[in-house]
């Protein structure tokens, strides 16, 4: 009788140890699965820096806006990234080759002396908001006091006819005139830079100029993200 009890006791002990071992094994397996899932899950996408910084005062009216992300954005997701400005400003969004930074290029100047709210949204991106205040333009700079008014008497003047058409917007460049500095700015938005620089100059030549760069005071503005490393001397 005693031997039977001992046998039953050993069986119970074995089963009890097996249950413990099974629970330990199951626990380890569950932890391993969780670790694998966390390792394969992509890092949550968020904005880590913007330029200009939040609450920037005296923002130039033709400035670009850039956002840097905590990880590269896949090409398929880049088209979902949007810069929404209030007041509304249309523009183009481009990416650096490594996908970690987006650049918003406005199609027109911002309004002067205004507060702007910028929202950056996109697929799997945590919404990011910030503000800036644009530079105020003095009243003396709002009117071309040193230029004759447009009219029939001035239609033969190439410069006046050109200025009457500015600002001029193209899908790849913008041509605008700053009266206070007497400078014609040409902003290039896309690659190849040389091709669109020449396209802008060709457009100016249609007003009767043979060599606009020597006959006019022209300055090129090129976003830094479009400038090859070997040509950084072109940076505005």
Image: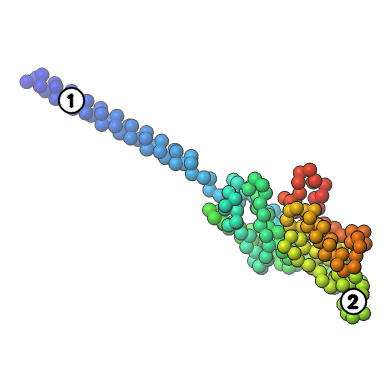
Write the residue at 76% across / 61% down: 173
User: Disc 1 on helix, strand or loop?
Assistant: helix
In this view of the protein, can residue 17 be seen by the observer? yes
* Horizontal relation, residue 99 to residue 183: left or right: left
The residue singled out by tag 2 in the image is: 155
Q: Position of residue 41 (x, y in %)?
A: 49, 44
Q: Position of residue 108 (x, y in %)?
A: 73, 65
Q: As rendered, which of 67 and 161 lies closer to the eye?
A: 161
**Mark 2, residues whose alpha carbon is within 10 Å: few (<14), some, or many (≥20)?**
few
State the image quarter where residue 118 is shown. bottom right
**Furthest residue toward bottom:** 152
* Horizontal relation, residue 9 to residue 235: left or right: left
The residue singled out by tag 1 in the image is: 11
- Do residues under tags 2 and 1 come within 8 Å of each other at their CB atoms? no
**Mark 1, residues whose alpha carbon is within 10 Å: few (<14), some, or many (≥20)?**
few
Q: Position of residue 136 (x, y in %)?
A: 78, 66
Write the residue at 87% across / 72% down: 161
């Amino acid at each position: 009788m005693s031997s039977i009890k001992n046998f039953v006791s050993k069986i119970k002990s074995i089963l009890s140890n097996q249950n413990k071992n099974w629970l330990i094994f199951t626990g380890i397996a569950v932890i391993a699965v969780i670790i694998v899932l966390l390792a394969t899950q992509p890092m949550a996408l968020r904005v880590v820096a913007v330029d200009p910084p939040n609450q920037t005062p005296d923002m130039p009216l033709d400035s670009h806006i850039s956002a840097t992300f905590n990880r590269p954005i896949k090409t398929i997701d880049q088209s979902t990234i949007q810069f929404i400005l209030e007041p509304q400003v249309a523009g183009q969004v481009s990416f650096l080759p490594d996908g970690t930074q987006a650049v918003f290029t406005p199609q027109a100047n911002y309004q002067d002396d205004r507060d702007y709210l910028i929202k950056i949204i996109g697929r799997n991106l945590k919404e990011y908001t910030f503000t800036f205040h644009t530079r105020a333009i003095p009243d003396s700079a709002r009117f071309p006091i040193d230029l004759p008014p447009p009219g029939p008497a001035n239609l033969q003047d190439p410069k006046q006819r050109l200025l009457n058409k500015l600002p001029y917007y193209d899908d790849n460049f913008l041509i605008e005139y700053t009266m206070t500095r007497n400078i014609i700015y040409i902003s290039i938005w896309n690659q190849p830079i040389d091709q669109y620089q020449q396209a802008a100059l060709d457009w100016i030549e249609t007003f009767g100029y043979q060599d606009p760069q020597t006959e006019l005071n022209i300055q090129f503005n090129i976003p830094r993200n479009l400038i090859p490393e070997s040509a950084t001397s072109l940076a505005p």
